[in-house]
Amino acid sequence: MKNPDDQNDDPAIGDMARRRFLQGVALATGAGALAVNGGAWGGSTLSDAFADFFQQHYQRMTEAEIRATIERIERKAKRRYGVDIRVDNTPAQEGVIFGYAINVSKCRGYRDCVHACARENNLSSDTQYIRVIEMDRDSTDLRHGDHYYDHEQVPVEGKYYLPMQCMQCDNPPCVKACPVEATWTEPDGIVVVDYDWCIGCRYCMTACPYQARHFNWGHPDLTSAGLNPDTHYLGNRPRPRGVVEKCHFCVQRTRKGRQPACQEACPTGARIFGNLLDPDSEIRYVLEHKAVFRLKEDLGTEPKFWYFRDE
Amino acid sequence: MTWPSRLLALLTVLAVAPCGVARAVEQQGAPPTADWDWSGFTGLDDTPVTKRAGISKAPVAAVVPRVGETAMPDFDAPARRAYAVFSGVPPFEVIPSQRDPGMHPCSSCHQWVLSDPRPRHLKKPHDNFELQHGLHGKGKFWCFTCHDLSGSGGLKTLTGEKLEFGDAYLLCSQCHVDQARDWAYGAHGKRAANWQGRRQVFNCTACHYQHRPGIKARAPQPGPPVRMGLERPAHWVAHDTERPKVHGYESVWQRAHRETQAAGSGQHTGDPQTNPAEQAADEKS
Amino acid sequence: MSDSRSGLFGFVLNGLGHMFRGGLLYWAWLALLLVLIVLGGWHYYLQLRDGLLVTNMSNQVSWGFYISNFTFLVGVAAAAVMLVVPAYIFNRKDIKDVVLMGDTMAIGAVAMAILFVVVDLGRPDRFWHLIPFIGRFNFPESMLAWDVIVLNGYLLLNFGISFYIVYNHYQGKEPNASRYFPWVLLAIFWAISIHTVTAFLYSANSARPYWHNALLAPRFIASAFASGPALMAIGLQIIRRVSDYPIRQSVIDHLALVAAIALQVTLFFVLAELFTDFYNEGEHAASARYLFFGLDGHTALTPWIWTAVLLLAVALLILMIHPLRTHPVYMNIAFVLTVVGVWIEKGMGLVIPAFVPTPIGEIYEYAPSATEIMVSLGIWAIGLLLFTLLAKAALPVQCSFLREKAHREVTHDDA
């Protein structure tokens, strides 16, 4: 684990301050948004529409093209939502491959992670990246699980709770399926989507064994007030209609050293995230000292997402 | 409790019990815990510990706990032995508990009034407080197992060494060796804010109220939404008991569960607070 | 025939002329198709405006009626090979006379299949991303990329071969077999491949146990060779009725026999799969159980599949009994039942259950929305229009060529 002495380098603190500031800006401009947001296409200009149409694949763009694209994305968000978003392009860190582990003995099914994720990642109200499944204590068969449990109190006797999200497979069937290479694995192991390249065929959704991919059937119903302005190109920037999106381990946070929103929100400490290549990391400790298991390992997808129980 | 009052409480703790770790956090200006969302935190389990399952296990002969080994509580061993679990751990800092010290105004009387050191069930004027931790009720656990009888009610180990409130984790780790080890290595508890850089972890008491450490059941947040423009099917709102069994058959567990429930006639009412399996889990966590 | 009339331009002009010449019935048919196309187009416009929200698809059932129709039509397109093989490989003269109609039907079916994929896309404006070199084509990794290649290739092949043959006939020449025969061989291989690739598109998904089995591609081909010839036989009989094109009954009988055999094989495959699913019922069988018996009280597809089973059983019965199979009325009943039965079984019955339950055990049912049905009707109308116009343009050429040929043969025999 790196332990930089310089306190100003602390990614969490610096990030937070900036985020506060941007949220302030967002609120201030929120009122103006209503006036600007009249046009059917968010009031986009002709040149932007052309540039949108001919926009290249993220991996094929030059630095300058990416910068221009980011500016255009920020402009579009300003027009549509009246919010000054910041689209970040931080690349993967060297020597980092992210892994996740969930302690199913600790998860109590509160769904705090689900909603923290939705807020952080600018999800449409009809999309959730995380699904917490209420399982019978005797079974790991997902078909016995209940997705819609709505008790007065959780946990419930005889049940345990299994949160699922994108497993960031090392051998992802979704990436293989995509006919236009709009989704790929980044060097830090995160499977990302270029929302501006996806053609919306949804073959990846068919290929995913974890139901981790979500389609924007309509335009995401984001509100100016609820928008998180701190975004990443491959992460939580506002998505267009008709494309697929998925959990990206909060790439906008984790590439700067912060925790994913779901982990930060978990009130029981059931979620453990870190660098698989760091022998001192918490995730490595879990993998080496706990009886871990993965879901649907028999499919050969090599998920980078583990589950374990307290002995 | 509102967010500012929590911060205030935190600062009070820092003022009352200044320890090395606390100072380190204070120097940063804004504690990283400020980003911690407490909105979902509704309190702790208040099931009396004596009514819980799994309490009957009798203490066995003292064992020196080592890394990778589970040990029963060793009440007579010097506290420092338990600290062995923290050697070789990647460096970390402990964030002090944010709990309001005003919750426990013991010292406001006992700084003048001499404490009765005899273990007993508390009567007036203490009847507003019940210890629901450890082997209380079996004569094994008592205020002065952890608190300093002589001073201002500060912490002490089982062998009488004094501890700051911020070092509560050292106190806990005397018994909860497995959890302490997992906590120190990051498999238990919570790390704050980041995965990289300074490792700051919450103290045990941030999540577990020390006098009643089980975590309380509470309402879940709303379930999954349905796609815009589509109807929520009826079965989405049905409770698990009303939901039909998976393609017509009852699993062996479900059958066993149903039959014992019928035989036990309401011993397990389905109330999560009297669920033995879960209480056992609580004891462990 | 003058030289200017025998050129390419004259050929096209001649074709266009035939397309827009016809009786009241012909014009009524075209008008009906146009009305359906306009209606479908309007609903597609609504879908473009509001997004795929107007469909009943969801994150749980992410493919629906469009892809169901696509699957069925790929089968129909592939079945043209059932005319091509006997015509060119076994040199059956009676079939060679009508093989062009099989190709034309394949063109219509592939065009519809491609359109069904296009209307299913969330971002049809980004269609250019699929064009190799200009876009970014994930070949050979993605089975969908394979499908794009085989479908477009098949369309081109069929169009090219048909065009070459009709153009030669138009010029009064016998087409040069050494020129087109290699392409016919390729087309035969290609016809099998479009359906195999489409089956692989599904069976490649280990996430979907309902599809993930080796029998899927053979089952696809078997049911395609039942529904395709049945549809073709219906089409040929209609052509025979509305035009003076000489279609011999032996061709229809041949198609009926093919359908009969293919139906039996299909049934065998389905039974083999049901046995494997249900003898020791496990995870793999959940979708099949949902389809045939309903799962946890969800039975939306059960009436559909039992209807299909009933239709196919009756059709099989008729086609298996020789006097019924050769009976003009019963035979056609069997053809219609086969087409509808396979359309249900191969469409809704194959695509939707793979999504119910989802890989993580959720059950969310699906039935097509009005928009989906209207857009699909529009696409069917486009396909039928394409087939009608192409057939209308090619038929007179074929007729006159066949007459001249017959005449030449007669005079040759006399000499």
Image (cartoon, coloured by chain):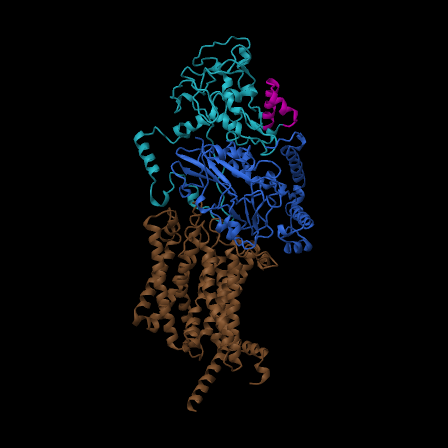
Query: In the image, residue B72 lies at what x, y percent?
Result: 43, 21
Q: Main secondary structure of the magenta part?
A: helix
The chain displayed cyan equals B
Q: Residue furthest bottom?
A: C415
Above or below C228: residue A226: above
Q: Quick check: can you spot residue B94?
A: yes
Decide: is A176 above or below C233: above
Most foreground residue, B112 or B89: B89
Q: Residue at x 37, y 54 (%)?
A: C302
The C terminus of chain A is located in which quarter? top left
- As drawn, the chain in brown is C
Using the image as rendered, state which of residue A134 and residue A89 is in the foreground. A89
Task: Please name the residue shown 60% across and 17% down the image.
Answer: B16
- Residue B19: say if magenta: yes
Rendered view: A75 above or below B24: below
Q: Colour of chain A?
A: blue
Q: Which residues are magenta?
A: B3-30
Lateral position of residue C53 relative to residue A44, left or right:
left
Q: Position of residue A289 (x, y in %)?
A: 48, 32
Front-most of residues B79 and B137: B79
Residue A248 image offset from top left, x and y in percent: 56, 43
